[in-house]
Amino acid sequence: MADAYDLSVIVPTFNEEENIAAIIEAIGEAFSKSGIRGEILVVDDGSSDRTIPIVGEIAGKTDDVRLIVRSEDHGLSQSVVEGFGAASADILLVIDADFSHPPELIPRFYEAIRDGADIAVGSRYMEGGDIEDWPLARRLISLSATAFGRILFPAVTDPVSGFFAVRREVVSGAPLAPRGYKILMEVLGRGRWRSVVEIPFVFRDREEGASKLRAGTVIDYLRQCAGIVRFSITRRSGRVSREWEKVVRFGLVGLSGILVNMGLLYALTEIAGLYYLVSAAIAIELSIVNNFVWNDVWTFKSAKNLGGNLQRFWSFQAVSMAGLVINMSLLYLLADVAGVYYLVANLAGIFIAFAWNYAANRHYTWRG
Ligand code: GDD
């Protein structure tokens, strides 16, 4: 019966023969322990292993498990959106098949939505959340994607999480343009929602099977971000467009800081005759002051709710110093340890430090 379910759990799969039967059982256990009347929708992209017959057999025995086999437009996000369309409950949840996401947390997501949130995001980056067993490179890629996503959605610590629940109205009729891996970004960017809560969880790397993340995933992600920004700018009213305006201003202020820094370094060294490292220290500090003033009176003029001027300044100063350390550490790690050409490594460092500076200042210095 269509309205018999409280919750529809969508499990996208591609070659998950080692995990699928066990995850279905674990989700079923989470339902029965919490008294949730739930259905499970496995949305498969034409796996070439035994995933399809295994799920087919389980689905043949119970109405609570359904199998959708797709043959066109291969993709994780596309599969999740198809699952949204086929689900029958008013609360929808997405979970990986490979136990990266703990199924025993499902009732907490369900309750969060039932208690009024529009979206509940499983976060690896808030207190209580973590990632186990990821190599440094994967951590760096994920941190960069997350930092970028957080510029668009500062209220969410893990906007690229694959573990989340959503109220049906958020996505039904929303102009989602699914592509690549980051379906949650699409839901946040184009869905209709007001409140989001986050639930910490520990991401465990899969023990069985292999990740399907490819190099093209990064390109897909950047294109997706650009699409979300374009969408909200054309709408003008979206929260992303207001946030994006601040990001652009913050970037322009950063550029003005570079000019101040370079000008002072030159003037103090060439005209005042100071030793260049002394000039550089003064130039860095004065460019921080320059950036603070412009950000305070222009970028974040409507959001000054952290204490007095001095308190905001010290917060900005601390964030900038940490940004400097992030920039230098990434430069060293990428250039010296990973062997990346140092100018490219520096660009990556600047990019991540910029994302850090923006997100941290938005969180600590200029909230609201
Ligand atoms: N239908 C379908 N189509 N499912 C897919 C596809 C696809 O093209 N590619 C992967 N899946 C399924 C997998 O079978 C698994 O259930 C889930 O999607 C996650 O796939 P993985 O390949 O294991 O993902 P990951 O561990 O690299 O990435 C996870 O973490 C990311 C955050 O770092 C996922 O949870 C992502 O959604 C998340 O963004």
Image (tube, rainbow, N blue to C red):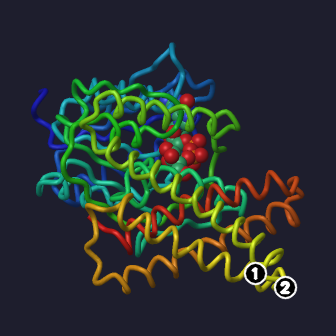
Secondary structure at badge 2 equals loop
Disc 1 target residue: 279
Q: Is residue 255 visible to the viewer in this orientation of the structure? A: yes
| Residue displayed at 40% across by 50% down | 163
User: What amino acid is at disc 1?
Assistant: Ser
Q: Is residue 97 visible to the viewer in this orientation of the structure? A: no
Asked if disc 1 and disc 2 are in contact, CB closer than 8 Å, the reply is yes
| Residue displayed at 47% across by 48% down | 248
Q: Residue 261 in the image: state x and y as whole percent.
A: 67, 68
Q: Quadrant of residue 140?
A: bottom right
Q: Is residue 228 left or right of residue 272?
A: left
Image mark for residue 80: none
Q: Quadrant of residue 266?
A: bottom right
* Residue count near mark 2 (Cα–Cα under 10 Å), binned few <14, some 14–19, many ≥20: few
Q: Quadrant of residue 86?
A: top left
Q: Residue 263 in the image: state x and y as whole percent.
A: 70, 66
Query: Taking 341 as reference, is 180 above or below it?
Result: above
Closer to the camera in the image, 237 or 195? 237
Query: Taking 123 as reference, is 321 above or below it?
Result: below
Q: Is residue 202 left or right of residue 256?
A: left
Alpha carbons under labels 1 and 2: distance apart? 6 Å
Quadrant, the C terminus: bottom left
Disc 2 target residue: 275
Closer to the camera in the image, 256 or 250? 256
Q: Residue 274 in the image: state x and y as whole percent.
A: 81, 85
Query: Taking 204 as reference, is 5 above or below it?
Result: above
Q: Residue 301 in the image: state x and y as whole percent.
A: 30, 62
| Residue displayed at 39% across by 46% down | 245
* Residue count near mark 1 (Cα–Cα under 10 Å), binned few <14, some 14–19, many ≥20: many
